[in-house]
Image (tube, rainbow, N blue to C red):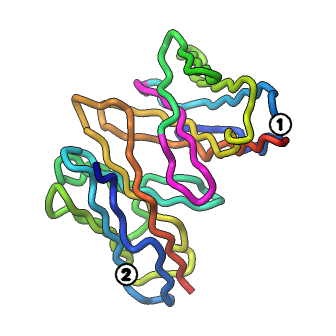
Amino acid sequence: DAGVIQSPRHEVTEMGQEVTLRCKPISGHNSLFWYRQTMMRGLELLIYFNNNVPIDDSGMPEDRFSAKMPNASFSTLKIQPSEPRDSAVYFCASSRGLGSNTGELFFGEGSRLTVL
Amino acid sequence: RKEVEQDPGPFNVPEGATVAFNCTYSNSASQSFFWYRQDCRKEPKLLMSVYSSGNEDGRFTAQLNRASQYISLLIRDSKLSDSATYLCVVNVLTGNQFYFGTGTSLTVIP
């Protein structure tokens, strides 16, 4: 079975450019999560969706960040304009969601973003 | 205040040693608890769930103390392959939010 698929795996961009990260969750999973990981702050929850609906976006750092989930099999995280402090590894994860939660989050391999 | 607090370490232990990690959580409504393992430059993966009565999986033992709001992980007979970062995770089921600690780094030395 395919796991959570993220793209791109690596991105290097210049400050001010738009960055779009993509995620395909595991089929049948109802919850999707975007995390950011840095050495200083560890794994931070940015936003999560249940059944394609954003439930909690309080972790989104500022208006430069936006996330969408147009359907059950695709989500994007966009940063516009990007800044050097956005450099981090961005993980997407999915789970079976409310009501049947096994506690297991399945993570993608991450998108390593470097903003110069 | 962070939802989950962990000692970042690093813990450097010889092969065969026993090592224990603790973490504390702040939300008394937390319902589920887990330990994840993350290898260098890889994604986190579930190591084990933590049950109220405590549970064991081979060399790994997890304990939960709800009164004190802390979770522990004990690794016996450490192997080189245990070297990784161990992340404490709590889940508040009402919102299905998973909160991660910053992780504890373990290096097992030959």
- Of all residues shown, which one is farthest toward the left? A71
Kindly tell me whether residue B89 is visible in this rendering: yes
Q: Is residue A69 above or below residue A82?
A: above
Labels 1 & 2 near each other (Cβ < 8 A): no
Q: Which quarter shows the C terminus of chain A?
A: bottom right
Residue with the mark numbered 2:
A80
Indicate the chain on which mark 1 is placed: B
x and y percentages locating residue B22 in the rendered image: 67, 29
A39 vs A10, nearest the viewer: A10
Which residue does the image show at 26% across and 50% down from the upper left? A26
Q: Is residue B22 above or below residue A16?
A: above
Q: Is residue A116 above or below residue A107?
A: below
Secondary structure type for disc 2:
loop
Q: Residues within 10 Å of mark 1 (few under 14, many from 20)?
A: some
What's drawn in magenta, residue-wise? B29-45
Residue with the mark numbered 1:
B13
B48 relative to A66 in the view: left or right:
right
Report the number of discs.
Answer: 2
Q: Residues within 10 Å of mark 2 (few under 14, many from 20)?
A: some
Which residue does the image show at 52% across and 43% down from the upper left? B100
